[in-house]
Amino acid sequence: MRFDEVSFQYGQSKPILHEVDFTVRRGAKITLMGQNGAGKSTIFQLITRFLEPDSGAVHRASQLTIASARQVIARDQLNLTVREFFEKYFSGKIYDIDPRIDEVLKIVNLKADHDKIIKSFSGGQQARLLLASALIQKPELLLLDEPTNNLDKEGIAHLTKFLVEYDKTCIVISHDAQFLNAFTQGVLYLNIFTHAVEQYTGNYFDLLKEISARMEKENRKNAQLAKKIQENKEKANFFAQKGGKMRLVAKRMREQAREAEENKVDVRKEDKTIRRFIIPAQEGLSGEIAHISSFSRIKNYVPVTRETNISLRKNNHLFIAGPNGIGKSTLLESIASKSVKGVFVSPDVRVGYYRQDFSTLDFESTVYESLVSAGENQSEEQVRAVAAGFLITQELLYAKIGTLSEGQKGLVVFACLVLQKPGLLILDEPTNHINFRHLPVIAAALHSYEGAMILVSHVPEFVQQIRIDEILDLEI
């Protein structure tokens, strides 16, 4: 597959690609990287012909079969059964669909009744279903968009082993460097500033070394040219004051200075990182904010009630652990709803909820409308200042939530939490879709949060950066 001078943009004001060239050879395992909102998923849509380039061409091998596993299951598919979900990936009737489903579910390490409704699966189980939906098509080119999102440690290990042993062509979008380095042979880097795709050999760490070396070389060259420019300008001024023929020498010095100025290179810009931020806690918090006396977990595919005694007060941080499908997200939803037996949340406490599927956001509202509705008595200046800190530009402010990338939606949710000032902060996999450069900043904000907090995450490196006062392991 080859991109030949491909350009693409959304409307007049959102360029994504500019005369992009790159090649993917048969059997290669490639990582596609770039900042949130740069257009990585757009490249996948150009490969699958869901979108067509404005100019240039995407060349594919004759009769190339392509399958893509998206970041999230489409909302209109959540009420389908497992069987109906897989059948949608074929144009005609497949009479042996059930054994095919069993075969791919075994590959992704998931047991599932074919008549079970998709929305009843956990986020991690849905991630496995998405991967299986691509594998069941037996494609020659497999496209995976953030496949580790929502997966637990076992799920990531299983996926990594599969990709290491996979004998066909694969392109993966991911921000998980450790996962990528296990199988990646090359990197396509989408530069959000130049709208170009840079092609590198090796894994992500090789990419970092090469970019760092190039930036150091560019800075060194510019420093040498700057020194030469200054020397020529000083000589030009000196000779100009001498008059006569010395003015010709001064003119040559100025020309050399201009030439050196033109030879200076634009030093590569790196992905921007969100600003450091805090999530202010609701004022006047006192006493018990939340209490969990019992909850339901899934054991051997059956709900089982378990007793516990967890009390959350101001400045208490609770981490909920357990494998995919055990009931972590269900427990978080029951806490956020304030209306489930066994869970008490003080009625005066504002709950800030970061959901995996971003369903706390109205996808038809603009980003600005979502931010304004998040808090009370916020001035326009405050809203815009918070938005800017999360790389929400003037253009993005008036875009509908539904048009944003998944990573940008995540940043909007964090901006909303800052404006909301919750007393109880509930976070369900807050690293999903987020550029790895932002994660230390987010971890620092959660570490210093002074309200009550409940966190679910399958990324140990992220959790280790956050103060945790108590752990509830649903598997024990």
Image: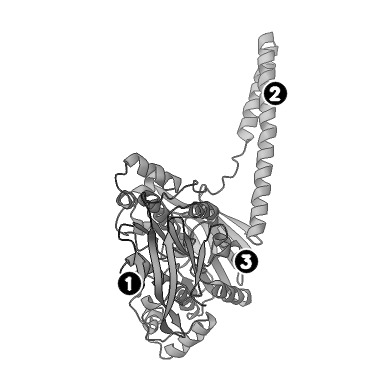
Q: Which residue is mark 2?
A: 231
Q: Which residue is mark 1?
A: 340
For the residue labelled by badge 1, is the local secondary structure a helix, a strand or a loop? loop
**Along the line of sight, the residue nearer the viewer: 288 or 153:** 288
Percent across and percent down for residue 93 are 37, 86
Q: Which residue is mark 3?
A: 184
Q: Is residue 198 visible?
A: yes
For the residue labelled by badge 3, is the local secondary structure a helix, a strand or a loop? loop
Q: Are marks 2 and 1 in contact (CB under 8 Å)?
A: no
Say left or right for 70 vs 181. left
Which quarter of the rendered picture does the N terminus lie within?
A: bottom right
Residue occupying the point 30% across, 60% down: 347
Q: Are marks 2 and 3 in contact (CB under 8 Å)?
A: no
Q: Nearer the viewer, mark 1 or mark 3?
A: 1
Percent across and percent down for residue 119 are 37, 75
In 3D space, how far apart are the residues under numbered discs 2 and 1 (Cα atoms)? 76 Å
Percent across and percent down for residue 318 are 48, 63
Residue occupying the point 66% across, 61% down: 202
**Along the line of sight, the residue nearer the viewer: 178 or 171:** 178
Q: Nearer the viewer, mark 2 or mark 1?
A: 1
